[in-house]
Amino acid sequence: MRRILVTGGAGFIGSNFVRMILGEQPDCLVVNLDKLTYAGNLENLASFLEHPNHKFVKGDICDGPLVADLIKDEKIDAIVNFAAESHVDRSITEPKVFIETNVAGTLTLLEAAREHRLERFIQVSTDEVYGALGKEGLFIEDTPLSPNSPYSASKAAADHLIHAFAHTWGLRCNITRCSNNYGPYQFPEKLIPLMINNALNDKPLPVYGDGMQVRDWLYVYDHCTAIWTVLTQAEPGRTYNIGGCNEKTNIDVVRTILKHLHKPESLVRHVTDRPGHDRRYAIDASRIMRELGWKPSVTFEQGLARTIDWYLGARDWLDSIVSGDYRNYYESMYDNR
Ligand code: NAD
Ligand code: TYD
């Protein structure tokens, strides 16, 4: 049996990954270490909390002794590190915790992985480490790192640490760099769920600047299958871009959501742009397709329709989030913008 330590498995992508493994890989035990920050939510794992192949542990990836004990006691052979502070806007107002979790936390995991000679360490990184593109071109795995936000700088620092541990001590690592994910259970601070939630409540949809920024959208389930493919098939040391080949402007995404929900375009509100806003991300994912045979299973149109349907059926989940601290967050981020 494979025994993996998944960190951040109560967040958006991590919980999708945990559910996928428990549903599809009967020979895999998941120990799920999550601090349950504002973004971590055990409701994301609801019926899977009692699954015999799942053990949830509330804790911090910066806690070295805890991580070491888990690796020893649970006989872990691989780590998949999703745990992170993940929102660019929050990194602009409060960068310190991004360095603590994304850099120091990753270092703690790496030290434990080295000490216990783990079979594999997968670092879930982001295309944002490459910086921004102009109108043309795609990020490839060899594009130099040039991060622009405190979030992407912290993720790039972690990527450098992964490389250093692989180079210096031969730790068997892979870095995956994916584009913007969307799908069920995404916290409604990110573009797509925020716009769905606002539209459902007939609230203005805050589009930063002209809305012509481009993101390359990846359905979360497809991201999870890509990570599993890397974990089980990749040679150590290889980095893989993961993308859905779905470049869209933000305003197009917002208009499509409104159309699905039969809401008027007059809800769109152009607001002050994000400082240092990266204009365009776009990923060349041909390496993982060519070397490991992975490909996305849905188009953006199919994935978005599924996502909207999921949010329509998950009003309780959404309401329980937006009725709590989220309200204060929303006011501080969007009032006076
Ligand atoms: P998320 O914010 O939804 O979830 C992060 C999870 O990590 C939460 O459950 C949180 O409680 C946990 N966490 C935070 N700090 C922790 C700590 N110190 N110790 C233990 N747990 C901690 O994030 P997400 O969108 O699911 O992203 C997961 C990973 O994927 C991140 O590493 C992120 O950088 C990367 N990524 C995300 C996207 C995207 O579009 N969402 C794109 C590219 C890369
Ligand atoms: P986001 O989901 O925060 O992801 P990232 O910044 O990591 O790409 O934002 C996606 C795009 O949507 C980005 O260009 C910023 C923009 N955006 C808005 O226009 N309005 C919003 O309220 C949010 C949250 C994002």
Image (spheres, grey):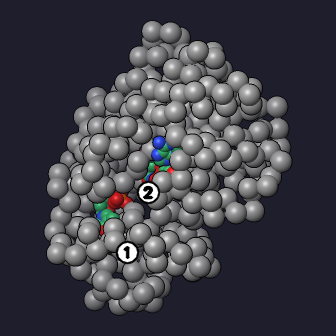
Disc 1 marks which amino acid? Arg
Callout 2: SS: loop
Residue 207 sits in quarter = bottom left
In the figure, is residue 293 to the left or right of 330? right
Which residue, given by chain and number where applicable, does mark 1 sit on?
A: 327
Q: Does the image show residue 108? A: yes
Cα–Cα gap, marks 1 and 2? 27 Å
Q: Nearer the viewer, residue 101 or 117?
A: 101
Q: Nearer the viewer, residue 29 or 108?
A: 108
Q: Position of residue 196 (x, y in %)?
A: 44, 76
Report the residue at 57% width, 46% height from top.
Answer: 34
Q: Does the image show residue 131? A: no
Q: Position of residue 23 (x, y in %)?
A: 77, 53
Callout 1: SS: helix
Disc 2 marks which amino acid? Trp
Q: Which mark is residue 250?
A: none
Which residue, given by chain and number where applicable, does mark 2 sit on?
A: 217
When the figure is inspected, residue 30 is found, relative to residue 326, above or below; the finding is: above
When the figure is inspected, residue 226 is found, relative to residue 74, above or below; the finding is: below
Q: Nearer the viewer, residue 252 or 200?
A: 200
Mark in front: 1 vs 2: 1
Sort mark 2 into few (<14), some (14-19) or many (20+) by Cα contacts within 10 Å: many
Residue 217 sits in quarter = bottom left
Q: Position of residue 112 (x, y in %)?
A: 56, 22
Q: Nearer the viewer, residue 258 or 94?
A: 94
Report the residue at 71% width, 41% height from top.
Answer: 30
- Among numbered discs 1 and 2, the one appearing first in the sequence: 2
**How many marks on residues?**
2
Report the residue at 58% width, 22% height from top.
Answer: 113
